[in-house]
């Protein structure tokens, strides 16, 4: 059970980091 929670947490962190990078890249491109 703990492994599943950690695995899901890792995916969420990677997803947030990826969307954050995409947003920053999009902002720079628009500017």
Image (cartoon, rainbow, N blue to C red):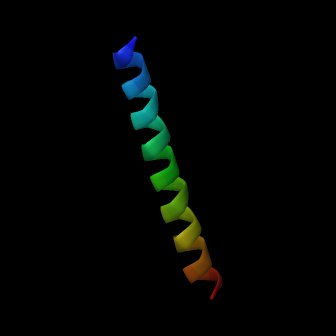
Q: Is residue 9 above or below residue 24?
A: above
Horizontal and vertical percent for residue 5? 43, 23
User: Who's the residue at 39% across and 36% down the image?
Assistant: 10
Query: Going by the picture, which residue comes out furthest to the front?
Result: 2
Point out the residue furthest to the bottom here.
Answer: 31
- For this view, does 28 lie left or right of residue 6? right
Q: Quadrant of residue 9?
A: top left
In this rendering, the answer to whether 26 lies above or below 12 is below
Q: Position of residue 18 (x, y in %)?
A: 48, 53
Relative height, residue 11 to residue 25 (above, below) = above
10 and 19: which one is in front? Answer: 10
Which residue is drawn at the image coordinates 36% and 17% (left, top)?
2
Quarter holding the C terminus is bottom right
Instruction: From this view, report whether residue 30 is shown above or below residue 26.
Output: below
- The image shows residue 17 at horizontal and vertical percentages of 46, 54
Q: Quadrant of the N terminus?
A: top left
């Amino acid at each position: 059970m703990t492994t599943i929670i950690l695995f899901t947490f890792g995916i969420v962190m990677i997803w947030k980091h990826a969307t954050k990078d995409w947003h920053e890249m999009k902002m720079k491109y628009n500017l």
